[in-house]
Structures are given as structure tokens and as C-alpha cells.
Image (cartoon, helix red, strand yellow):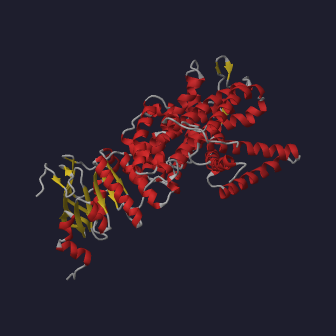
Amino acid sequence: MLDQTQGYTTEDGRKIGGVVMEMKNITLRFGGVVAIKDISFDIRQGEIRAIIGPNGAGKSSMLNVISGFYHPQEGEVWYQGARRPPMKPYQVAQQGIARTFQNIALFEGMTVLDNVMTGRIREMKAGLFAQAIWKGRAEREEVANREVVEKVIDFLEIQHIRKTPVGRLPYGLKKRVELARALAAEPSILLLDEPMAGMNVEEKEDMSRFILDVNDEFGTTIALIEHDMGVVMDLSDRVVVMDYGKKIGDGTPDEVRNNQDVIDAYLGVAHD
Amino acid sequence: MFYREAGDFKTSYEQDSQTFPIKFDRYRYYAVLVAAFAVVPFVINDYWVNAVFLPFLIYSIAAIGLNILVGYCGQVSLGTGGFMAVGAYASYKLMTAFPEVSIFFHIILAGGVTSIVCVLFGLPSLRIKGFYLAVATLAAQFFLVWLFNRVGWFYNYSASGQITAPERSVFGVAITGAANPPWSAYLFCLVFTVAAAIIARNLTRGMAGRKWMAIRDMDIAAEIIGVNPLKAKLTAFAVSGFFVGISGALFFAVYLGAVEVGEAFGINKSFLVLFMVIIGGLGSIFGSFAGAAFLVLLPVLLKNTLVGGLGWPTDLAAHLEFIIVGALIIIFLIAEPHGLAQLWRVAKEKLRLWPFPH
């Protein structure tokens, strides 16, 4: 069984560390609707953690709880060993949690470079006056962060569209730019909400490769929601399965695949 | 042929993020600056200063200010006239209260005061968006004009209710009042316009601008990557207010000399500056200049051709001017909704290939 401080070793031999984020008995209600019901799970350092479940299971709500859009009525979010007080999304971002959206949330009027640069917001603290004269700290930060951003751009192979306004890009590239923006923040946890939604097989393969590379090269902890079971089972180290706001399974892909509740939820079973 | 970027290589990120990354643009910019500072003041006369150059320079500052708010941060404002009035009255109070201080600092301080007022009226932007915010800023417009009309302290209890700029000079040359040479007022405004453009450009190409544009394009996504929406919107209001205030102060002190608030800074002014921004191009500093030039020059041009050239009666020409300007605005918005700045961009793309398009 898993231990709080000790990690585990994955099948392919990667060392997974201790708990980075832990959700404890989260319950989220919208009026009378219970979106999430008493769910607990943890995310460990360096792992790829998937959240799956049928439509309306509460996966996106869960991600929104993590990133601070929703505030659960009950339960606690623990992050890096401390209980996290309720905070606004931008505060969560400043703590090092970056995310992408199911339907792309890029800044359409800005170039790819500017979009990715916004990801560096945590590191750029020059005052308005320094920025107004473009001297001292403002200029130094601009150049230093540009270097980091260029690395991410290289990594995701979007150099050729650096100066293109995002509004002109095709869907698959937009998804990649959004991932780049999240990566530029050098997050301690990267949340991906359906990174492969609406992609063809080739694009899915590319995206999967990027996700694995990100995890491998930067050691980024990743939590993702995805509907493509093949992808999920291949990529993730551990999987949480949700259905109707409840957790019905948690474990390695193999464990989950053979879990009777999970099979029922996906294939359907006669409800009395 | 006229416009080339081939062979213009950048070897550092500083070079790549400069204002005019293309050599040709950069040299043209220097040429315009040299002409504006070293040539125009010697050839300029009273008519040109008052009919063309002063209004163009002053409205450009206002348009840059409004463009930061509307074009970059996406917060629609109809209160520009009111905020210009704040700048005008602030500079008036400062000029009369501290006559020994240079007018230069009065104008800048007036911008600071306007900035604070603008932030106060920007506070509702956190809760309301789009048209509703426009209406809230409209309230600012009417409230401010009412305030400056009613409260005697603002116009030093003068009998007419007007404010009149006292004579001030910089380096011994009169800037305000009747006796100033035309080039002094021009140069004084030019300094402010150039500084405003450079500051605005620096802010918008850096992180402040990215935060504003992020809020404009998608506020939820902006928040998720760590933009504090309160701070980003209020800095936009503050910077915008600063420029609009300076333009209001210059409009009063240098251009008009005497001002009656309802006439000079009414709702018409708000719309005029907004039109400049929209016609010039939202989210473009160059567009602010282009829009200001368009709306300042067009009436002058029409008047000169209709009255001077064709000999029409003045009142008929004045009415026709309204019709023509209005129609042009509509045609313009239909044909090129992204404004003159976009036309300029398209022209550059074409010129890059000319005369060998393939």
C-alpha cells in the first residue's frame, strides 16, 4: 500500500515521490445538486495522475476546485504539506499550479510569444515605472524570461509560429500553445483538462508524447482529465475514477480496468 | 522594395523586443522625430498651430490614454470628457495655487490627479463589464461636469464660471496666454505627446500590456495564469487617466486658454476621442495617432475645400461637414473595422512584396 512520505516506483522504473496535493473529503454542491460527494485522493510528486469518468461525473468540477474556481462546502485541500485556505484562481496560480482548459482559453489577440510570456507572470515583478521607461529590472526580466519561454517554445516545437497571433492558428496548434503557456510557468502541478479533446490520432500521439516528455524532462507532476481510455491507460501512473460525483475507483490503470464498479459505470448496468 | 525586412537579423532578445524591430521603421521614426522637433517649429504659423497641430497632438495623448483602457484592457469608457475636465481643473487649481512652480510639473501633476479619479470610477469595472461599464463611466462624465459647474472652489469663484489659464512660461518663453509664439505651444505639447507615446509603447510591449490584453481577450484565462484582475484593470484605469488628464490640462491651458466645462468637456468630447480610437485602431499606439489625425484633419480639409475652394456659405458647409464625417465613419467601420492601423499593416504587407508580388 502507498505510504504518505515514501513514494513508489512505476512499472517503467520512474521514482514517484511524496504527496504534493491531497484532497480530503471534498464535497461540492450547487444548490441542491451535489457535483462532488466526499471525494479524497492524492497527487504525488512526479506522477501522471488521471481523473476519468463518464460525462457529468464531476471531473471538471474537481479540477476547478483545485484551481480555485469553486470552493467546496466541505473538505480540505492540502498543498505541499499545508492546508490551503480558500483562494482566488490567480492566487492558486501564483502558488505554482498551472492548467489548461477543455475549450482552449488563449488570448486570441496576442501573438504566441506574448501568450507564452504571460505564463511567466510569477517571475516578472518589475514596477510600472520601470516598465514605462523599459530600463533596469523591467528590461532584465523581459530578457531573462524570454530565454525560459524560448526553451518551452523549442520543446513544444512551435518556433515557426512565434510571432503569429493565436487567433489565426488551427485547433491542434492552439492546444499546444496553451500547454506551452502553462509550462512556461514552471508549475509544480500541471492540470490538463481534456488535452486531447477533438484531435485526430496523429495529433493525439503528438500530444501524448509532449505530456510524457514534460513529465520526463522537467519532472512535472501532471493531473489530467481525458476521455480517450487508450491514452489514459497508456499515460497515467494512477487513475481516479468518478461517477455521479462519487469516487468509484483509484489505483493503477490495471487495477482500475478490472474494477467491477468502473466497468459498470462505463458499460452500464441496470439501475433499480 | 520600399519596405524590407530581409537581412535584418536579430542576435539578442533585446533587439527582438524593441519598439521598431525593422530597420526601415526605425529610421522612419527617427526621421519623423527630427522633422517634428527641428523642422516644423521653424515653418509653422499661427493658423497651422491652432487648427491642426495643437489639436492633433493633444487629442493624440487622449486617444493613447483611451486606447490603453479600451483597446488594450477591453474596458469601455465614455467618461473621457469628464476625465479631461479633471485634468484641466487640476492644472488650473495648481497653476493658480502655486504660480512659482513650472507649468510643466503642473501638467504632470494634473495627470496624476486624473489618474486617481479615474481609478475611483474604474472600481465598478470589477463587477460590471461591457455596455454596463460604459454606462457607469457615462455617469462619471455627467457627474464630473456637474461638479465643476456647481462647486465654485474649482473655478476660484470667478463670476463667469469659466477658468482662464494664467500666463506661464518655460525657459523664459511664453507657453500659455495670448502673447506666446506659435512654436512654443507646439513644442511644449510635442514633448508630452512623444513622451506619452513612448511610455504607452513600453508598457504595452511589456508585462503590464500583456496583463491588460489577457484581461481583454479572456478574463478567466487571465486569472488562471495568475493575473490579478483587480490590479490589472485598475492600473489600466490609472495609466489611461494619467494620459487623458495630461491631454485635458494641455487642452485647457495651452490650446483653448479659457474653458467652460460643459462646452469643452461635454459628452461630445468623450465620443470624439472614442471615435478616434475606434477609427484609428483598437489596441494600437499608431492607431491612436492615425485616428486623432483623421478626425482633426478631416473637418479642416472639408472646410477649406467647401468654403475656401467652392465658395459655399459657411453654415451650409458646417452642416455638410457633419454629414460627410458621419458617413465616412460609418463607411470606415464597415469597410475596415480594425481601423487605420490595420490598413497600414495591410499596406506594409503589400509593400514588402512590391513590385514583385510573386
Which quadrant holds residue B83?
top right
Q: Position of residue B85 (x, y in %)?
A: 59, 38
> Which quadrant is home to the C terminus of chain A?
bottom left
- Left or right of B164? Residue A209 is left
Residue furthest front as drawn: A12
Q: Position of residue B64 (x, y in %)?
A: 58, 40
Q: Please determine whether, in this image, residue A193 is positioned above or below residue B251.
A: below
| Residue under the point 41% across and 36% down | A144
| Residue under the point 66% across and 48% down | B340
> Which quadrant is home to the N terminus of chain A?
bottom left
Does residue B61 appear anywhere in the picture? yes
| Residue under the point 61% across and 52% down | B338
Q: How many labels does the image show?
A: 0
Does residue A70 appear anywhere in the picture? no
Which quadrant holds residue B51?
top right
| Residue under the point 28% across and 60% down | A235
Q: Please determine whether, in this image, residue B173 is positioned above or below residue B336.
A: above
Q: Position of residue B278 (x, y in %)?
A: 62, 50
Q: Position of residue A78 (x, y in %)?
A: 20, 50
Taking depth in this image into account, of B140 and A51 the one nearest to the observer is: A51
Q: Please determine whether, in this image, residue A203 is positioned above or below residue B92.
A: below
Taking depth in this image into account, of B177 and B104 the one nearest to the observer is: B104
Taking depth in this image into account, of B208 and A87 the one nearest to the observer is: B208
Which quadrant holds residue B82?
top right
